[in-house]
Amino acid sequence: MEHKPRGRPDFILLFSTFLLVGFGLVMVFSSSSPLGLHKYGDSWYFVQRQIVFALLGWLVLLVLMNIPFSRLKRLAYPSLIFALILLVLVLLVGTNAKGATRWLYIGPFGLQPAEFVKLSIILYLAYLISKKGTHIQDFKKGLAPILVVIGIVVVLILRQPDLGTALNLLCITFILVIVGGANLRHISLLALAVAPVLLMLAIFESYRFRRLTSFLNPWDDPADSGYQLIQSFFALSRGGIAGAGLGQSIQKFHYLPEAHTDFIFAVIGEELGFIGIVGFMLVLGLFIMRGFVAALKCKDLYGTLLGMGIVAMFCIQIVFNLGAVTGSLPITGVTLPFTSYGGSSLLISMAGTGILLSISRENNRLRMENQKTLSTGR
């Protein structure tokens, strides 16, 4: 069997990933050092763990980048089964923290199964939708099996509870079935059916209802439900145009909850100001654009769906996170890709990037073959 040479990866995508991961490590150290020193007697406590996952993430990225994305089809069902097992395990033996059971601990390291579920669902949906072809337009043969699986996964995640990840998965699913050619009438009816259920879930849980309403006017309850958002506003306003300087945040000194995780963007704004935020957003935007281009240029429907699912995962997380930090959306506890502290999130982000790079390599291989054919034809 003749071995086909692989194309070059998208070096802009690879370089932007390097910048984002490096910047994330710097900001994790800056935002977490007071908490690490206070709680563990070590200002490097959190960033040391993040570095471990960053190194592991680079290994995963390089491996996936060098595997043709078409071979990932065989992981569709095993990864889904593995994800379901993790979700059940976290409910049975997971660690409860702040009223939610979302973590499985292996020695000193904690894993968040919901993060692994995102990529597993994308692998599963990309394979299933591409396999169904035009049958995706038929509700019974196309959408119904997908909805059953997604429904089970979402219910397990809501049991933790983790509404942010559940919403993320639902958004990814809707995007992929639309890209896959599903009947828009079916999708519209499903959206109308799902919306009231999500609203009820939010209303009937008091803490969720407070989150949904407090972002509209956090000053109504500045000592409780509005406290975190108000501190975020203080951080962003203090940053001004040029920022207070790297490492000079005041809010990270136990004023802003989750300063190194969900609200790390507020610390970025405080320390680096509007200029730093713009620079960071430009690199993040470049990363998203190159991922989108790789998915769009892919000649294989499976590759397009896979790439679009991964890009959608990043975009939804970014929108949810920045929306929460700036008071534009309710707080959902969603991390900022590559930047927030969290080994599971970083690992999955880099695995997803490795797949995007694999897709870009295949695109470049086909482009080089076409150019060679044209030049030979002349």
Image: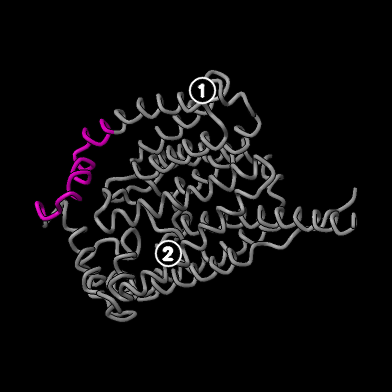
Q: Residue furthest left?
A: 220
Q: Does the magenta stretch include residue 87?
A: no
First to last magenta residue range? 199-221
Residue 156 as seen in the image, left or right of residue 57: left
Identify the residue at image location x=44%, y=53%: 105
Indicate how the structure is coloured in the image: one colour
Task: Find disc 1 in the rendering and name its residue.
Answer: 144
Quadrant in the picture for residue 351? bottom right
Task: Find disc 2 in the rendering and name its residue.
Answer: 339
Q: Is residue 81 visible?
A: no
In depth, the one of 359 and 151 nearer the eye is: 359
Q: Where is residue 182 in the image (x, y as percent from the top left)?
A: 53, 29
Q: Where is residue 114 in the image (x, y as percent from the top left)?
A: 44, 45
In depth, the one of 119 and 87 nearer the eye is: 119
Quadrant in the picture for residue 263? bottom left
Q: Quadrant of the C terminus?
A: bottom right
Kind of residue at disc 1: Ala
Kind of residue at disc 2: Thr
Q: What element carries label 2?
A: loop
Residue 214 as seen in the image, left or right of residue 324: left
Q: Position of residue 227 (x, y in %)?
A: 16, 58
